Amino acid sequence: MNDCPVCCGPLSRIEVAPCFDCGHVPRELDECRRGEHEYHVFELWGRELVLCDFCDADFGSYLPDYWGLPAGPLPDYPLQLIRRVAHPYIAQDLYCAACRKRLAFLLFRHHALARNAGEPSSRTLP
């Protein structure tokens, strides 16, 4: 995949911590190396995502329209805990400078937008 599934912009390869949401941020990479966060795999809208303990606590701050839901008050997103990431490590992923997110998160968002609009989502993690 050479382009962002959300904005179609170019992607570049970067190092990432396990968190789909903030794993691309240099501070999070340092904190992961020092073992300062726990990471968990959650399921939401039929798709798995990995969040650090900070992003898990903050996930409810996303406005509903970001996920393709009707505008309104902040909902209680039904994150279902699947498992703890036993051995977190630094990996490689792609990054969209326009969206300011890593590909794993962008694929999750693409799926959520399609699902919440009632459309099938065909893109998957590489």
Image (tube, rainbow, N blue to C red):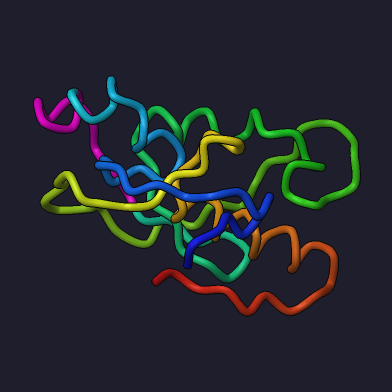
Residue drawn at x 18%, y 24% is 30
Q: Could you tell me which residue is drawn at 63 percent across and 64 percent down? A: 45
Image vertical order of residue 35 relative to residue 111, above or below: above
Which contiguous range is marked in magenta? 31-40
**What x and y, as percent, mark residue 49?**
44, 56
| Image spot of residue 124 (x, y percent) | 50, 73
Query: Where is residue 66, by image quadrant?
Result: top right
Q: Is residue 44 left or right of residue 69?
A: left
| 68 lies left or right of 19 | right
Answer whether residue 45 is magenta in the image.
no
Tell me: 113 left or right of 73.
left
What residue is rendered at 39% in x and 27% in y? 54
Residue located farthest toward the top when viewing the structure as drawn: 27
Q: Is residue 34 magenta?
A: yes
Compare residues 1 and 125 and report the one nearer the observer: 1
Q: Which residue is outermost to the right?
A: 71
x and y percentages locating residue 37 in the rendered image: 23, 31
